[in-house]
């Protein structure tokens, strides 16, 4: 594959495009509602109407407004049909020919779409994720060619540093600093790992990207491998994501076939291969040292750090681990420039962030907004607020590792520092909205039960502490607890947070602590009245 080959592929793909395109979402959310049958009926209706030369029915990835699926978009009319059934196919074709259509539609100019800024999701819902030609036509693999032809590895690392990109997996560690550390670490063998073990309840960002634009992630991994001196990559993906796995496997085969993975990429000395490793669903394997143990075929349990993976990782070799969204930002940064990316977002949180909106909210789905976007704009304007005119009570960010942000703080900008000040975290991008009917102690119990079940059991604070905290929450909800029990719960939160081995235990208390901070009255209302004023145990704040 050469630059000329890329251009010829792009030209051929664009020349083959038809005047009208019907984009049918075939991501997991719409597929579960029957979108495959919709696409088949649309293709049949086009054929019966004799419009094969004018109309293309294209299967695409996530079209973002998941609550209204199956979704079908008609271009260039910019019409978005919602809750489409196979029986609607004839009406859609009739509308293309100028007929009146009464099918339900969404407004592409509504705040849900208009306030998004797509970088990672730019191709989602637009290109066919199962055809490498479609990705190349969207300027895919141009950044990789430029990197191999014109840039030294250190220049690539410097560009990522300059962009200000931070890891999108949760902690927000500077990506360029991590790349630089791996690049400088001595070792004849180095590895790249894409962490696609997305386990937070309500989160589906990484799944959607892999289902919708797998080559974007592969290109980012290849650029990273060149920058740090690696020749082997692994994508660690959850077994619960069969469609993402299938499309990744297909994308890897296609890239190898045309010489964009494997040996001598773009006729250079650079070699890079990618293999998939399927996780069995253990939440703790999202932690990077547990993930590496799983890739090695061992039980997925974390180990103490240092040494960090950048120095001693997979099979004791320097290893770069980033998540799906982080790698998906790499090619756009190299293609459009570090200054462009750094000009989006806030001073310390650059670029955009993908979120999965879920919970008690009208518009559930996938969004991408600039860092620093106020939480209120996301949940009230883009999300449409709580259903049936209810009031939003809180927003939970960061999954089991995050916290609950109450309604009075909805004007908080969504960036790493602002969320941390409120006792939550950015996390990988799950955002669960709660309305006034939600009981916050129930929320805390739900996440504690999740952490208790997912603890690997290696360290006592997490293994025993999460069980005891869950028991105390159950006791409070059963109205059998006293103020002394509440103080004990806070003591346990402090102990587990400060003594657990890995991030699972260290952050497990966050939902409890944040709900205690902002909704303490809901806990106190459940305590035994006659012992409500009992002297509490000494507990750290």
Image: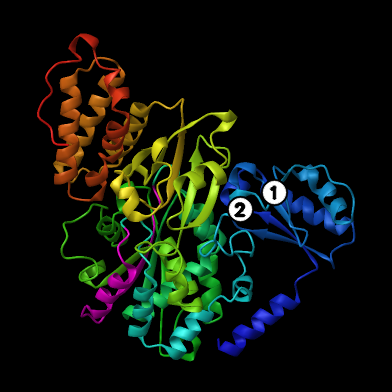
How many marks the image carries: the answer is: 2
Residue at 51%, 59% in the rendered image: 209
Distance of mark 2 from mark 1, alpha carbons? 8 Å
On screen, residue 307 versus residue 162, left or right, reads: left
Asked if residue 183 is among those painted magenta in the image, a careful observer would answer yes
Q: Quadrant of the C terminus?
A: top left
Say which residue label 1 marks. Answer: 107
On screen, residue 459 versus residue 24, left or right, reads: left
Residue at 63%, 53% in the rendered image: 26
Looking at the image, is 483 positioned above or below residue 356?
A: above
Looking at the image, is 16 positioned above or below residue 476?
A: below
Residue 407 shows in this picture: yes
Please provide percent x and percent y for residue 287: 29, 54
Q: Nearer the viewer, residue 246 or 350?
A: 350
The answer to whether marks 2 and 1 mark residues whose Cβ atoms lie closer than 8 Å is yes
Looking at the image, is 6 positioned above or below residue 34?
A: below
Residue 231 shows in this picture: no
On screen, residue 454 versus residue 96, left or right, reads: left
Q: The magenta stretch spans which residues?
A: 172-199
Say which residue label 2 marks. Answer: 113
Please provide percent x and percent y for residue 477: 31, 20
Looking at this view, name the residue that lies furthest to the top: 530
Q: Nearer the viewer, residue 320 or 190?
A: 320
């Amino acid at each position: 594959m050469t630059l000329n080959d890329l251009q010829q592929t792009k030209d051929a793909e664009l020349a083959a495009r038809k005047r009208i395109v019907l984009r049918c979402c075939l991501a997991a959310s719409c597929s579960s509602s029957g979108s495959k049958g919709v696409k088949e009926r649309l293709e049949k209706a086009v054929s019966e109407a004799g419009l094969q030369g004018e109309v293309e029915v294209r299967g695409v990835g996530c079209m973002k407004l998941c609550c209204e699926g199956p979704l079908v978009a008609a271009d260039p009319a910019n019409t978005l049909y919602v809750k489409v059934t196979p029986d609607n196919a004839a009406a859609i074709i009739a509308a293309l020919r100028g007929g009146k259509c009464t099918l339900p539609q969404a407004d592409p100019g509504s705040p849900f779409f208009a306030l998004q800024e797509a970088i990672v999701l730019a191709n989602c819902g637009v290109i066919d994720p199962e055809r490498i030609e479609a990705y190349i036509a969207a300027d895919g693999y141009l950044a990789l060619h430029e990197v191999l032809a014109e840039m030294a590895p250190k220049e690539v690392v410097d560009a990522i540093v300059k962009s200000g990109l931070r890891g999108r997996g949760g902690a927000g560690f500077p990506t360029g600093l991590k790349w630089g550390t791996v690049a400088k670490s001595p070792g004849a063998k180095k590895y790249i790992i894409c962490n696609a073990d997305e386990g937070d309840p309500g989160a589906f960002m990484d799944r959607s990207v892999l289902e919708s634009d797998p080559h974007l992630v592969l290109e980012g991994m290849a650029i990273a491998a060149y920058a740090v001196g690696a020749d082997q990559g692994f994508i660690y993906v959850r077994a619960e994501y069969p469609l993402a796995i299938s499309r990744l496997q297909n994308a890897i085969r296609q890239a190898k076939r045309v010489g964009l993975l494997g040996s001598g990429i773009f006729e250079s000395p650079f070699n890079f291969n990618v293999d998939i490793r399927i996780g069995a669903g253990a939440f703790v394997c999202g932690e990077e040292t547990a993930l590496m143990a799983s890739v090695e075929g061992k039980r997925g349990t974390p180990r103490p750090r240092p040494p960090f993976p950048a120095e001693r990782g997979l099979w004791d070799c320097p290893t770069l681990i980033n998540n799906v969204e982080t790698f998906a930002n790499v090619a756009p940064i190299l293609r459009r420039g570090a200054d462009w990316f750094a000009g989006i977002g806030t001073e310390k949180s650059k670029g955009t962030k993908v979120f999965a909106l879920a919970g008690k909210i009208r518009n559930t789905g996938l969004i991408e907004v600039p860092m620093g976007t106020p939480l209120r704009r996301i949940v009230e304007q883009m999300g449409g607020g709580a259903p049936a005119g209810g009031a939003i009570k809180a927003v939970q960010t960061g999954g089991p590792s995050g916290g609950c942000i109450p309604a009075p703080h909805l004007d908080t900008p969504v960036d790493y520092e602002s969320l941390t000040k409120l006792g939550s975290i950015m996390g990988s991008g799950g955002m669960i909205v709660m309305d006034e009917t939600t009981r916050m102690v129930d929320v805390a119990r739900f996440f504690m039960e999740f952490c208790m079940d997912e603890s690997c059991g290696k360290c006592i604070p997490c293994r025993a502490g999460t069980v005891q905290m869950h028991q105390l929450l159950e006791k409070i909800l059963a109205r059998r607890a006293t103020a002394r029990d509440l103080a004990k719960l806070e003591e346990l939160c402090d102990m587990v947070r400060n003594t657990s081995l890995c991030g699972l235990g260290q952050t497990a208390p966050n939902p409890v602590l944040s709900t205690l901070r902002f909704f303490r009255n809901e806990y106190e209302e459940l305590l035994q009245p006659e012992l409500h004023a009992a002297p509490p145990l000494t507990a750290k704040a």
